Image (spheres, grey):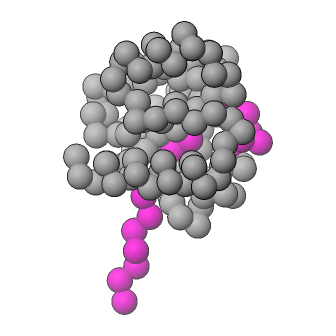
Amino acid sequence: METERKTPILYIDDDPENLLGFKLSFSNQFSIYTSKNTEEAYLILKNTIIAVVLVDYKMPVEDGIAFVDRIRHEFPNVVFILVSAWAEVYFLIKALNMNCFFGFIQKPWNHLELSQMLQNASKLFYIK
């Protein structure tokens, strides 16, 4: 009997409650990795095949957009999704102009909406 492979997803957020909630909500559908900062996230990306990365915009040392801008060429097949509680137009335009984000999810997220976005992002990763 063949076991179905779960898509590996990394969620980067400096709030441990968000990381725990995400892991509890989606670990039955996906293989979930979490990181509280971009340094740790980079090490995970270097050592693990990750299909989708959800990255929080506002983080203490390096914001999510700067992180993705810095690493996106090193990981060209990864699908990036921006997450934020703050829907500031400036950063959304900046992210869209980078042409590397698959989507945007506002916190607190709608479970069904995020689940569908993760499924679609996973499909994109596997057809790249």
- Does the magenta portion include 13? yes
- Does the magenta portion include 24? no
Q: In which quarter of the image is the N terminus?
A: bottom left
Q: Is residue 84 visible?
A: yes
Asked where in the image residue 5 lies, by quadrant, the reply is bottom left
Q: In this view, does 66 lie to the left or right of 89?
A: left
Image coordinates of residue 36 in percent, x first then y, are 64, 34
Q: Is residue 121 left or right of residue 105?
A: left
Q: Is residue 40 visible?
A: no
Residue under the point 27% across and 34% down? 76
Residue under the point 53% across and 23% down? 64
Residue span colored magenta: 1-19
Which residue appears farthest toward the top when viewing the image? 90
Image coordinates of residue 65 in percent, x first then y, are 49, 19
Please, is residue 10 above or below residue 55 in the view?
Answer: below
Residue under the point 66% across and 42% down? 109
Image coordinates of residue 105 in percent, x first then y, are 57, 36
Q: Which of 42 and 124 is in front in this view?
A: 124
Residue under the point 35% across and 40% down? 78
Which residue appears farthest toward the left when viewing the image? 128
Which residue appears farthest toward the right when viewing the image? 17
Image coordinates of residue 110 in percent, x first then y, are 66, 47
Q: Nearer the viewer, residue 49 or 68?
A: 68
Q: Which of 28 and 102 is in front in this view?
A: 102
Please, is residue 40 above or below residue 116 in the view?
Answer: above
Q: How many labels does the image show?
A: 0
Asked where in the image residue 28 lies, by quadrant, the reply is bottom right
